[in-house]
Amino acid sequence: MTYAVVLAAHGSRDPASSAQFEQLAALVRSLDPGRVITHGYLEFNSPTLDEAAREAVRAGAREVVLVPGVLLAATHAKNDLPAEVQALRLEFPDVTFHYGAAMDLHPALLDVCRERLVQAEQTGGEVRRERTLLLVVGRGTTDPDANGDVHKLARFLEEGLGYGASSVCFSGTAQPDLKTGLARAARLGFARVVVMPYLLFGGVLARRVEEAVAAARQRYPDVEFLTTRPLGAHPKVAQVFLERAREGVQGQGHMNCSLCKYRVQVVGYEHQVGEVQVGHHGAARGLEARQQEPAAPREIPAYVPHPIEAESFRIIEELRDWSAVPEADRYAAQRLVHTAGDPAVVDELFFSPGACEAGIGAVLRGLTVVTDVTMVSSGLKREVLKTLGVPVWCGVHDPETHLLSREAGITRSAAGVRRAFERFGNDCILAIGDAPTAIFEANRLIRERHWRPALVIGLPVGFVGTRESKAALRACLSVPRITNAGTRGGSPWASSVVNALMIQAQNRLAQNRLAQNRLAQNRLEQNRLAQNGLTQTSPPAAPVRDA
Protein backbone atom coordinates (compact mmCIF):
# COMPACT_ATOMS: atom_id res chain seq x y z
CA MET A 1 0.00 0.00 0.00
CA THR A 2 3.00 2.30 -0.35
CA TYR A 3 2.49 3.68 -3.84
CA ALA A 4 -0.03 6.31 -4.92
CA VAL A 5 -2.06 6.23 -8.14
CA VAL A 6 -2.76 9.12 -10.50
CA LEU A 7 -5.60 8.39 -12.92
CA ALA A 8 -4.97 10.30 -16.15
CA ALA A 9 -7.92 11.27 -18.35
CA HIS A 10 -7.83 13.19 -21.60
CA GLY A 11 -10.43 15.78 -20.63
CA SER A 12 -13.46 17.07 -22.48
CA ARG A 13 -15.34 20.27 -23.16
CA ASP A 14 -18.49 18.32 -22.26
CA PRO A 15 -19.16 18.58 -18.49
CA ALA A 16 -21.04 15.25 -18.58
CA SER A 17 -17.90 13.45 -19.75
CA SER A 18 -15.71 14.84 -16.98
CA ALA A 19 -18.48 14.07 -14.45
CA GLN A 20 -18.44 10.42 -15.57
CA PHE A 21 -14.68 10.27 -15.05
CA GLU A 22 -15.12 11.74 -11.58
CA GLN A 23 -17.58 8.93 -10.84
CA LEU A 24 -15.10 6.34 -12.10
CA ALA A 25 -12.30 7.85 -10.01
CA ALA A 26 -14.55 7.65 -6.93
CA LEU A 27 -15.30 4.01 -7.77
CA VAL A 28 -11.59 3.21 -8.04
CA ARG A 29 -11.00 4.78 -4.61
CA SER A 30 -13.82 2.73 -3.10
CA LEU A 31 -12.19 -0.49 -4.34
CA ASP A 32 -8.83 0.40 -2.75
CA PRO A 33 -9.72 2.67 0.19
CA GLY A 34 -6.32 2.59 1.90
CA ARG A 35 -4.43 4.06 -1.05
CA VAL A 36 -3.80 7.64 -2.14
CA ILE A 37 -5.59 7.89 -5.50
CA THR A 38 -5.84 11.20 -7.33
CA HIS A 39 -6.97 12.06 -10.85
CA GLY A 40 -6.15 14.71 -13.43
CA TYR A 41 -6.61 15.71 -17.05
CA LEU A 42 -4.39 16.30 -20.08
CA GLU A 43 -6.48 19.20 -21.31
CA PHE A 44 -9.62 21.32 -20.77
CA ASN A 45 -10.49 20.20 -17.24
CA SER A 46 -8.98 20.59 -13.78
CA PRO A 47 -7.13 19.35 -11.86
CA THR A 48 -4.36 18.99 -14.43
CA LEU A 49 -2.09 15.97 -14.26
CA ASP A 50 0.77 17.84 -12.63
CA GLU A 51 -1.66 19.17 -9.99
CA ALA A 52 -2.93 15.63 -9.35
CA ALA A 53 0.64 14.37 -8.94
CA ARG A 54 1.50 17.20 -6.54
CA GLU A 55 -1.55 16.30 -4.47
CA ALA A 56 -0.28 12.72 -4.19
CA VAL A 57 3.20 13.92 -3.18
CA ARG A 58 1.73 16.28 -0.58
CA ALA A 59 -0.14 13.29 0.83
CA GLY A 60 3.23 11.68 1.53
CA ALA A 61 3.65 9.41 -1.51
CA ARG A 62 7.25 8.67 -2.49
CA GLU A 63 6.24 6.24 -5.20
CA VAL A 64 3.59 7.27 -7.75
CA VAL A 65 2.19 5.43 -10.76
CA LEU A 66 0.38 7.30 -13.52
CA VAL A 67 -2.28 5.17 -15.24
CA PRO A 68 -3.61 6.26 -18.66
CA GLY A 69 -7.36 6.57 -18.72
CA VAL A 70 -7.43 5.68 -22.42
CA LEU A 71 -8.72 2.50 -23.97
CA LEU A 72 -6.02 1.99 -26.58
CA ALA A 73 -2.31 2.77 -26.78
CA ALA A 74 -1.99 5.54 -29.37
CA THR A 75 -0.35 8.98 -29.28
CA HIS A 76 -1.72 9.93 -25.85
CA ALA A 77 -0.45 6.75 -24.20
CA LYS A 78 2.81 6.52 -26.16
CA ASN A 79 3.75 10.17 -26.38
CA ASP A 80 1.83 12.78 -24.37
CA LEU A 81 1.55 10.94 -21.06
CA PRO A 82 5.17 9.69 -21.02
CA ALA A 83 6.19 13.32 -21.55
CA GLU A 84 4.11 14.23 -18.48
CA VAL A 85 5.84 11.52 -16.45
CA GLN A 86 9.26 12.78 -17.48
CA ALA A 87 8.36 16.33 -16.46
CA LEU A 88 7.20 15.07 -13.07
CA ARG A 89 10.44 13.15 -12.56
CA LEU A 90 12.37 16.37 -13.15
CA GLU A 91 10.12 18.31 -10.75
CA PHE A 92 10.29 15.67 -8.00
CA PRO A 93 13.70 13.96 -8.16
CA ASP A 94 13.14 12.30 -4.78
CA VAL A 95 9.90 10.63 -5.87
CA THR A 96 9.80 7.48 -8.01
CA PHE A 97 7.31 7.78 -10.86
CA HIS A 98 6.04 4.72 -12.71
CA TYR A 99 3.90 4.53 -15.82
CA GLY A 100 1.11 2.01 -16.36
CA ALA A 101 -0.07 0.59 -19.66
CA ALA A 102 -3.23 1.69 -21.43
CA MET A 103 -6.38 -0.32 -20.71
CA ASP A 104 -6.25 -2.10 -24.09
CA LEU A 105 -8.36 -5.21 -24.79
CA HIS A 106 -8.56 -6.48 -21.23
CA PRO A 107 -10.92 -9.47 -20.71
CA ALA A 108 -12.82 -7.47 -18.09
CA LEU A 109 -13.49 -4.76 -20.67
CA LEU A 110 -14.80 -7.39 -23.08
CA ASP A 111 -17.23 -8.38 -20.33
CA VAL A 112 -18.40 -4.78 -20.07
CA CYS A 113 -18.79 -4.63 -23.85
CA ARG A 114 -21.00 -7.74 -23.71
CA GLU A 115 -23.10 -6.15 -20.98
CA ARG A 116 -23.57 -2.98 -23.01
CA LEU A 117 -24.51 -5.01 -26.11
CA VAL A 118 -27.11 -7.05 -24.23
CA GLN A 119 -28.59 -3.86 -22.78
CA ALA A 120 -28.87 -2.33 -26.25
CA GLU A 121 -30.46 -5.44 -27.75
CA GLN A 122 -33.27 -5.28 -25.19
CA THR A 123 -34.37 -1.91 -26.59
CA GLY A 124 -35.26 -3.42 -29.98
CA GLY A 125 -37.28 -6.30 -31.31
CA GLU A 126 -36.30 -9.96 -31.23
CA VAL A 127 -33.64 -10.47 -33.89
CA ARG A 128 -31.24 -13.39 -33.82
CA ARG A 129 -27.59 -12.45 -33.62
CA GLU A 130 -26.82 -14.36 -36.80
CA ARG A 131 -28.99 -11.77 -38.56
CA THR A 132 -27.24 -8.91 -36.75
CA LEU A 133 -24.15 -6.97 -37.82
CA LEU A 134 -21.93 -5.60 -35.06
CA LEU A 135 -20.44 -2.22 -35.99
CA VAL A 136 -17.66 -1.20 -33.61
CA VAL A 137 -16.85 2.52 -33.67
CA GLY A 138 -13.33 3.40 -32.58
CA ARG A 139 -12.17 6.83 -31.59
CA GLY A 140 -9.72 6.88 -34.49
CA THR A 141 -6.03 7.73 -34.17
CA THR A 142 -2.93 8.24 -36.28
CA ASP A 143 -1.50 5.03 -34.84
CA PRO A 144 -2.16 1.90 -36.94
CA ASP A 145 -1.52 -0.34 -33.93
CA ALA A 146 -4.37 1.23 -31.95
CA ASN A 147 -6.70 1.29 -34.95
CA GLY A 148 -5.89 -2.36 -35.56
CA ASP A 149 -6.91 -3.21 -32.00
CA VAL A 150 -10.42 -1.94 -32.77
CA HIS A 151 -10.66 -4.52 -35.54
CA LYS A 152 -9.37 -7.16 -33.13
CA LEU A 153 -12.03 -6.19 -30.58
CA ALA A 154 -14.74 -6.47 -33.24
CA ARG A 155 -13.55 -9.96 -34.16
CA PHE A 156 -13.48 -11.10 -30.53
CA LEU A 157 -17.05 -9.92 -29.96
CA GLU A 158 -18.34 -11.24 -33.29
CA GLU A 159 -17.06 -14.75 -32.69
CA GLY A 160 -17.58 -14.79 -28.94
CA LEU A 161 -21.19 -13.59 -29.06
CA GLY A 162 -22.27 -15.14 -32.35
CA TYR A 163 -22.96 -12.09 -34.49
CA GLY A 164 -23.48 -12.69 -38.21
CA ALA A 165 -20.60 -10.36 -39.05
CA SER A 166 -18.68 -7.38 -37.72
CA SER A 167 -17.36 -4.18 -39.18
CA VAL A 168 -15.34 -1.20 -37.96
CA CYS A 169 -15.44 2.53 -38.51
CA PHE A 170 -14.08 5.55 -36.62
CA SER A 171 -15.54 8.73 -35.16
CA GLY A 172 -12.46 10.80 -35.92
CA THR A 173 -9.09 10.87 -37.73
CA ALA A 174 -9.04 7.32 -39.16
CA GLN A 175 -11.05 5.90 -42.04
CA PRO A 176 -13.71 4.77 -42.75
CA ASP A 177 -15.64 7.51 -41.01
CA LEU A 178 -19.00 7.12 -39.31
CA LYS A 179 -21.17 7.94 -42.29
CA THR A 180 -19.28 5.54 -44.55
CA GLY A 181 -19.25 2.78 -41.94
CA LEU A 182 -22.99 3.04 -41.35
CA ALA A 183 -23.74 3.09 -45.08
CA ARG A 184 -21.65 -0.04 -45.65
CA ALA A 185 -23.29 -1.79 -42.72
CA ALA A 186 -26.78 -0.96 -44.01
CA ARG A 187 -26.05 -2.43 -47.44
CA LEU A 188 -24.84 -5.83 -46.23
CA GLY A 189 -28.34 -7.27 -45.90
CA PHE A 190 -28.62 -7.69 -42.12
CA ALA A 191 -31.91 -7.06 -40.35
CA ARG A 192 -30.19 -5.26 -37.48
CA VAL A 193 -27.02 -3.25 -36.96
CA VAL A 194 -25.80 -2.83 -33.39
CA VAL A 195 -23.46 0.15 -33.16
CA MET A 196 -20.98 -0.07 -30.28
CA PRO A 197 -18.82 3.04 -29.70
CA TYR A 198 -15.70 1.77 -27.96
CA LEU A 199 -15.43 4.81 -25.70
CA LEU A 200 -14.89 5.17 -21.98
CA PHE A 201 -17.33 8.03 -21.51
CA GLY A 202 -20.03 10.03 -23.23
CA GLY A 203 -19.24 13.44 -24.65
CA VAL A 204 -18.55 14.97 -28.03
CA LEU A 205 -17.63 11.71 -29.77
CA ALA A 206 -20.52 9.77 -28.24
CA ARG A 207 -22.98 12.44 -29.40
CA ARG A 208 -21.41 12.30 -32.84
CA VAL A 209 -22.17 8.57 -32.96
CA GLU A 210 -25.74 9.07 -31.76
CA GLU A 211 -26.42 11.76 -34.36
CA ALA A 212 -24.94 9.66 -37.17
CA VAL A 213 -27.02 6.64 -36.18
CA ALA A 214 -30.16 8.79 -36.04
CA ALA A 215 -29.45 9.97 -39.58
CA ALA A 216 -28.85 6.37 -40.71
CA ARG A 217 -32.25 5.32 -39.33
CA GLN A 218 -33.88 7.93 -41.53
CA ARG A 219 -31.84 6.97 -44.58
CA TYR A 220 -32.19 3.17 -44.20
CA PRO A 221 -35.65 2.55 -42.69
CA ASP A 222 -35.54 -1.18 -43.50
CA VAL A 223 -32.62 -1.76 -41.12
CA GLU A 224 -32.96 -1.61 -37.34
CA PHE A 225 -30.13 0.41 -35.78
CA LEU A 226 -29.33 0.09 -32.07
CA THR A 227 -26.60 1.92 -30.15
CA THR A 228 -24.79 0.87 -26.98
CA ARG A 229 -23.69 3.16 -24.18
CA PRO A 230 -19.99 3.85 -23.56
CA LEU A 231 -18.27 1.65 -20.97
CA GLY A 232 -18.64 4.32 -18.29
CA ALA A 233 -18.08 4.09 -14.53
CA HIS A 234 -18.31 0.31 -14.29
CA PRO A 235 -16.70 -1.70 -11.45
CA LYS A 236 -14.78 -3.85 -13.93
CA VAL A 237 -13.36 -0.73 -15.59
CA ALA A 238 -12.22 0.43 -12.14
CA GLN A 239 -10.62 -2.95 -11.52
CA VAL A 240 -8.64 -2.68 -14.75
CA PHE A 241 -7.32 0.70 -13.60
CA LEU A 242 -6.03 -0.81 -10.36
CA GLU A 243 -4.53 -3.78 -12.19
CA ARG A 244 -2.68 -1.52 -14.61
CA ALA A 245 -1.38 0.52 -11.66
CA ARG A 246 -0.03 -2.60 -9.95
CA GLU A 247 1.62 -3.79 -13.18
CA GLY A 248 3.23 -0.38 -13.65
CA VAL A 249 4.78 -0.41 -10.18
CA GLN A 250 6.01 -3.98 -10.64
CA GLY A 251 7.51 -3.16 -14.05
CA GLN A 252 5.13 -5.54 -15.79
CA GLY A 253 3.19 -3.01 -17.82
CA HIS A 254 2.72 -4.57 -21.22
CA MET A 255 2.95 -2.52 -24.39
CA ASN A 256 2.83 -3.87 -27.92
CA CYS A 257 6.33 -2.64 -28.71
CA SER A 258 6.76 -5.10 -31.57
CA LEU A 259 4.29 -3.02 -33.61
CA CYS A 260 4.93 0.43 -32.11
CA LYS A 261 5.59 2.92 -34.89
CA TYR A 262 7.94 4.87 -32.59
CA ARG A 263 10.19 1.83 -31.97
CA VAL A 264 10.16 -0.30 -35.13
CA GLN A 265 9.82 0.36 -38.84
CA VAL A 266 6.13 -0.29 -39.38
CA VAL A 267 5.04 -0.25 -43.02
CA GLY A 268 4.16 3.30 -44.02
CA TYR A 269 5.37 4.85 -40.75
CA GLU A 270 9.11 4.36 -41.01
CA HIS A 271 9.79 8.10 -40.66
CA GLN A 272 8.34 8.17 -37.12
CA VAL A 273 10.84 5.76 -35.58
CA GLY A 274 12.57 7.50 -32.67
CA GLU A 275 10.27 10.53 -32.82
CA VAL A 276 10.77 12.85 -29.85
CA GLN A 277 8.09 12.48 -27.17
CA VAL A 278 6.64 15.94 -26.67
CA GLY A 279 3.28 16.80 -25.13
CA HIS A 280 0.74 18.47 -27.40
CA HIS A 281 -1.78 19.73 -24.87
CA GLY A 282 -0.11 22.79 -23.35
CA ALA A 283 -2.47 25.31 -24.91
CA ALA A 284 -5.57 23.48 -23.64
CA ARG A 285 -4.25 22.48 -20.19
CA GLY A 286 -6.85 23.39 -17.58
CA LEU A 287 -8.68 25.50 -20.15
CA GLU A 288 -12.11 25.19 -18.55
CA ALA A 289 -10.80 26.55 -15.25
CA ARG A 290 -9.08 29.56 -16.73
CA GLN A 291 -10.92 32.86 -16.56
CA GLN A 292 -9.29 34.92 -19.28
CA GLU A 293 -9.90 36.47 -22.65
CA PRO A 294 -9.33 34.29 -25.72
CA ALA A 295 -5.72 34.34 -26.86
CA ALA A 296 -4.91 36.87 -29.56
CA PRO A 297 -4.26 35.46 -33.03
CA ARG A 298 -0.64 34.58 -33.65
CA GLU A 299 1.22 37.43 -35.28
CA ILE A 300 2.93 36.54 -38.55
CA PRO A 301 5.98 38.77 -39.11
CA ALA A 302 7.00 39.97 -42.54
CA TYR A 303 9.96 38.17 -44.10
CA VAL A 304 13.21 39.97 -43.30
CA PRO A 305 16.03 39.10 -45.74
CA HIS A 306 19.65 38.93 -44.68
CA PRO A 307 21.47 42.18 -45.58
CA ILE A 308 23.52 40.36 -48.23
CA GLU A 309 20.35 38.88 -49.69
CA ALA A 310 18.68 42.29 -49.71
CA GLU A 311 21.67 43.84 -51.47
CA SER A 312 21.67 41.02 -54.02
CA PHE A 313 18.05 41.67 -54.91
CA ARG A 314 18.73 45.40 -55.21
CA ILE A 315 21.42 44.58 -57.75
CA ILE A 316 19.17 42.08 -59.56
CA GLU A 317 16.49 44.76 -59.90
CA GLU A 318 18.99 46.91 -61.81
CA LEU A 319 20.47 44.17 -64.01
CA ARG A 320 17.71 44.23 -66.61
CA ASP A 321 14.41 45.73 -67.65
CA TRP A 322 11.75 43.86 -65.68
CA SER A 323 8.73 45.50 -67.29
CA ALA A 324 8.26 42.55 -69.66
CA VAL A 325 7.90 40.13 -66.74
CA PRO A 326 4.37 40.11 -65.28
CA GLU A 327 4.34 41.58 -61.79
CA ALA A 328 2.80 38.41 -60.33
CA ASP A 329 5.78 36.35 -61.58
CA ARG A 330 8.54 38.89 -61.01
CA TYR A 331 9.64 37.92 -57.51
CA ALA A 332 9.91 34.22 -58.37
CA ALA A 333 11.87 35.11 -61.51
CA GLN A 334 14.23 37.30 -59.52
CA ARG A 335 14.86 34.55 -57.01
CA LEU A 336 15.77 32.26 -59.91
CA VAL A 337 18.20 34.89 -61.16
CA HIS A 338 19.65 35.03 -57.66
CA THR A 339 20.05 31.23 -57.65
CA ALA A 340 21.50 30.95 -61.15
CA GLY A 341 23.65 34.08 -60.93
CA ASP A 342 22.58 34.99 -64.47
CA PRO A 343 19.80 37.44 -65.45
CA ALA A 344 19.55 35.74 -68.85
CA VAL A 345 17.68 32.80 -67.32
CA VAL A 346 14.55 34.98 -67.28
CA ASP A 347 14.29 34.60 -71.06
CA GLU A 348 14.02 30.81 -70.65
CA LEU A 349 11.32 30.84 -67.97
CA PHE A 350 7.68 29.92 -68.47
CA PHE A 351 4.91 30.79 -66.00
CA SER A 352 1.42 29.72 -66.94
CA PRO A 353 -1.15 32.47 -66.28
CA GLY A 354 -1.88 32.69 -62.56
CA ALA A 355 0.70 30.03 -61.63
CA CYS A 356 2.37 32.04 -58.87
CA GLU A 357 -0.94 33.16 -57.43
CA ALA A 358 -2.11 29.54 -57.40
CA GLY A 359 1.07 28.55 -55.57
CA ILE A 360 0.73 31.31 -52.98
CA GLY A 361 -2.88 30.31 -52.39
CA ALA A 362 -1.85 26.68 -51.97
CA VAL A 363 0.76 27.67 -49.36
CA LEU A 364 -1.80 29.75 -47.48
CA ARG A 365 -4.16 26.76 -47.48
CA GLY A 366 -1.46 24.60 -45.90
CA LEU A 367 -1.07 22.17 -48.79
CA THR A 368 1.90 19.80 -48.78
CA VAL A 369 4.99 20.59 -50.85
CA VAL A 370 6.01 17.35 -52.59
CA THR A 371 9.58 17.18 -53.89
CA ASP A 372 11.15 14.66 -56.24
CA VAL A 373 14.45 14.54 -54.33
CA THR A 374 15.61 15.49 -50.85
CA MET A 375 17.88 18.23 -52.24
CA VAL A 376 14.80 20.26 -53.12
CA SER A 377 13.49 19.81 -49.57
CA SER A 378 16.87 20.80 -48.14
CA GLY A 379 16.85 24.06 -50.10
CA LEU A 380 13.60 25.31 -48.56
CA LYS A 381 13.90 28.09 -46.00
CA ARG A 382 13.41 26.42 -42.64
CA GLU A 383 12.33 29.53 -40.77
CA VAL A 384 9.65 30.32 -43.33
CA LEU A 385 8.44 26.71 -43.31
CA LYS A 386 8.17 26.87 -39.53
CA THR A 387 6.41 30.23 -39.52
CA LEU A 388 3.78 29.12 -42.03
CA GLY A 389 3.58 25.49 -40.91
CA VAL A 390 4.02 24.21 -44.46
CA PRO A 391 4.32 20.38 -44.61
CA VAL A 392 6.96 18.90 -46.93
CA TRP A 393 7.10 15.34 -48.23
CA CYS A 394 9.66 13.49 -50.31
CA GLY A 395 9.18 9.78 -50.87
CA VAL A 396 12.23 9.01 -52.96
CA HIS A 397 13.98 7.05 -50.19
CA ASP A 398 10.93 5.31 -48.69
CA PRO A 399 10.92 1.50 -48.82
CA GLU A 400 7.56 1.53 -50.61
CA THR A 401 8.98 3.83 -53.27
CA HIS A 402 11.85 1.41 -53.83
CA LEU A 403 9.40 -1.49 -54.18
CA LEU A 404 7.15 0.44 -56.55
CA SER A 405 10.14 1.49 -58.64
CA ARG A 406 11.31 -2.11 -58.95
CA GLU A 407 7.92 -3.66 -59.64
CA ALA A 408 6.66 -0.97 -62.04
CA GLY A 409 9.98 -0.55 -63.83
CA ILE A 410 10.16 3.21 -63.26
CA THR A 411 12.67 5.48 -61.58
CA ARG A 412 12.41 6.16 -57.86
CA SER A 413 11.61 9.80 -58.53
CA ALA A 414 8.74 8.79 -60.79
CA ALA A 415 7.58 6.28 -58.19
CA GLY A 416 7.64 9.04 -55.56
CA VAL A 417 5.40 11.18 -57.76
CA ARG A 418 2.99 8.27 -58.21
CA ARG A 419 2.87 7.77 -54.45
CA ALA A 420 2.22 11.50 -53.95
CA PHE A 421 -0.79 11.18 -56.26
CA GLU A 422 -2.13 8.33 -54.13
CA ARG A 423 -1.25 9.97 -50.81
CA PHE A 424 -2.25 13.61 -51.28
CA GLY A 425 -4.54 13.70 -54.30
CA ASN A 426 -4.89 17.28 -55.55
CA ASP A 427 -3.85 18.82 -52.20
CA CYS A 428 -0.20 19.42 -52.97
CA ILE A 429 2.40 21.53 -54.75
CA LEU A 430 4.73 19.40 -56.87
CA ALA A 431 8.32 20.72 -56.98
CA ILE A 432 10.60 18.77 -59.37
CA GLY A 433 14.22 19.86 -59.56
CA ASP A 434 16.15 16.75 -60.56
CA ALA A 435 14.35 14.05 -62.52
CA PRO A 436 12.74 14.49 -65.96
CA THR A 437 11.08 11.11 -65.36
CA ALA A 438 9.19 12.67 -62.45
CA ILE A 439 7.75 15.29 -64.84
CA PHE A 440 6.78 12.63 -67.37
CA GLU A 441 5.02 10.63 -64.65
CA ALA A 442 3.22 13.73 -63.37
CA ASN A 443 2.08 14.53 -66.91
CA ARG A 444 0.80 10.98 -67.34
CA LEU A 445 -1.18 11.12 -64.10
CA ILE A 446 -2.61 14.51 -65.03
CA ARG A 447 -3.64 13.23 -68.45
CA GLU A 448 -4.83 9.72 -67.60
CA ARG A 449 -5.91 9.94 -63.96
CA HIS A 450 -7.10 13.56 -63.99
CA TRP A 451 -4.67 14.57 -61.27
CA ARG A 452 -4.83 18.28 -60.53
CA PRO A 453 -2.04 19.43 -58.18
CA ALA A 454 -2.35 23.06 -57.12
CA LEU A 455 0.92 23.83 -58.94
CA VAL A 456 3.60 21.86 -60.78
CA ILE A 457 7.14 23.26 -60.75
CA GLY A 458 9.36 21.43 -63.24
CA LEU A 459 12.96 22.67 -63.37
CA PRO A 460 15.29 19.65 -63.68
CA VAL A 461 18.84 19.95 -64.98
CA GLY A 462 20.63 17.70 -67.45
CA PHE A 463 20.79 16.44 -71.00
CA VAL A 464 18.72 13.23 -71.04
CA GLY A 465 15.02 13.90 -71.39
CA THR A 466 15.26 17.30 -69.74
CA ARG A 467 14.19 19.47 -72.70
CA GLU A 468 11.46 17.02 -73.66
CA SER A 469 9.99 16.78 -70.15
CA LYS A 470 9.86 20.56 -69.79
CA ALA A 471 8.23 20.94 -73.19
CA ALA A 472 5.63 18.34 -72.21
CA LEU A 473 4.90 20.19 -68.96
CA ARG A 474 4.59 23.48 -70.77
CA ALA A 475 2.06 21.93 -73.15
CA CYS A 476 0.02 20.48 -70.25
CA LEU A 477 -2.89 22.92 -70.02
CA SER A 478 -4.74 21.25 -67.14
CA VAL A 479 -2.68 22.56 -64.20
CA PRO A 480 -0.81 25.75 -63.21
CA ARG A 481 2.86 25.21 -63.98
CA ILE A 482 6.28 26.82 -63.85
CA THR A 483 9.15 25.54 -65.98
CA ASN A 484 11.86 26.70 -68.39
CA ALA A 485 13.40 25.80 -71.72
CA GLY A 486 16.77 24.15 -72.20
CA THR A 487 18.97 22.05 -69.98
CA ARG A 488 19.55 24.46 -67.11
CA GLY A 489 17.81 24.07 -63.76
CA GLY A 490 18.26 21.80 -60.78
CA SER A 491 17.10 21.29 -57.23
CA PRO A 492 18.16 24.80 -56.08
CA TRP A 493 15.98 26.25 -58.83
CA ALA A 494 12.89 24.34 -57.71
CA SER A 495 13.61 25.29 -54.09
CA SER A 496 13.92 28.95 -55.07
CA VAL A 497 10.46 29.02 -56.65
CA VAL A 498 8.87 27.43 -53.58
CA ASN A 499 10.76 29.87 -51.34
CA ALA A 500 9.48 32.77 -53.42
CA LEU A 501 5.89 31.56 -53.04
CA MET A 502 6.27 31.03 -49.29
CA ILE A 503 7.90 34.42 -48.71
CA GLN A 504 5.10 36.16 -50.59
CA ALA A 505 2.52 34.17 -48.61
CA GLN A 506 4.17 35.18 -45.34
CA ASN A 507 4.31 38.83 -46.34
CA ARG A 508 0.67 38.73 -47.40
CA LEU A 509 -0.32 37.37 -44.02
CA ALA A 510 1.77 40.02 -42.26
CA GLN A 511 0.25 42.80 -44.36
CA ASN A 512 -3.24 41.47 -43.84
CA ARG A 513 -2.78 41.42 -40.08
CA LEU A 514 -1.39 44.95 -40.19
CA ALA A 515 -4.36 46.11 -42.24
CA GLN A 516 -6.77 44.45 -39.83
CA ASN A 517 -5.05 46.15 -36.89
CA ARG A 518 -5.26 49.53 -38.65
CA LEU A 519 -8.95 48.97 -39.38
CA ALA A 520 -9.61 48.03 -35.75
CA GLN A 521 -7.76 51.12 -34.52
CA ASN A 522 -9.69 53.29 -36.97
CA ARG A 523 -13.00 51.89 -35.74
CA LEU A 524 -12.00 52.52 -32.11
CA GLU A 525 -11.11 56.09 -33.02
CA GLN A 526 -14.42 56.57 -34.81
CA ASN A 527 -16.29 55.27 -31.75
CA ARG A 528 -14.34 57.61 -29.49
CA LEU A 529 -15.08 60.61 -31.70
CA ALA A 530 -18.73 59.65 -31.95
CA GLN A 531 -19.00 59.45 -28.18
CA ASN A 532 -17.52 62.95 -27.96
CA GLY A 533 -19.91 64.34 -30.59
CA LEU A 534 -17.16 64.79 -33.19
CA THR A 535 -16.79 63.53 -36.77
CA GLN A 536 -14.00 61.60 -38.42
CA THR A 537 -12.10 63.79 -40.88
CA SER A 538 -9.41 61.31 -41.93
CA PRO A 539 -10.10 59.02 -44.89
CA PRO A 540 -11.48 55.57 -44.04
CA ALA A 541 -9.13 52.61 -43.90
CA ALA A 542 -8.68 50.62 -47.09
CA PRO A 543 -10.75 47.45 -47.32
CA VAL A 544 -8.97 44.41 -45.97
CA ARG A 545 -8.39 41.50 -48.30
CA ASP A 546 -8.78 38.17 -46.56
CA ALA A 547 -5.66 36.15 -47.32
Image: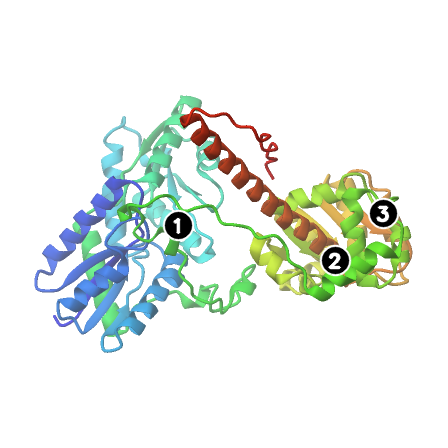
User: Is tag 3's residue or tag 1's residue first in the polypeptide sequence?
Assistant: 1
In the rendered image, the vertical position of residue 95 relative to residue 194, given as above or below: below
Give the x, y percent position of residue 521.
49, 38
Depth order, front residue of 484/148: 484
Q: Earlier in the sequence, mark 1 or mark 2?
A: 1
Identify the residue at image location x=46%, y=67%: 276
Residue 466 visible, this angle: no
Element marked by disc 1:
helix
The residue closer to the viewer here, 328 or 359, is 328
Amino acid type of disc 1? Val
Q: CA distance from mark 1 to mark 2?
A: 45 Å
Amino acid on which disc 2 is placed: Ser
Which quadrant of the figure contains the N terminus?
bottom left
How many numbered callouts? 3
Classify residue 312 as left or right of residue 65.
right
Q: Residue at x 72, y 53 (%)?
A: 500
The residue indicated by pointer 1 is 150
The residue tagged 2 is 496
Question: In the orientation shown, which residue stands out farthest toward the bottom?
Answer: 94
State the mark number for residue 350: 3
Mark 3: few, some, or many residues within 10 Å (few <14, many ≥20)? some
**Horizontally, is 420 left or right of 294 in the view?**
right
Residue 360: where, in percent of width, then height?
68, 45
Residue type at numbered disc 3: Phe
Real-space CA distance between mark 2 and mark 3, rounded to the nearest whole angstrom:
15 Å
Asked if 493 appears above or below 209 in the picture, the reply is: below
Say which of marks 3 and 1 sits in front.
3
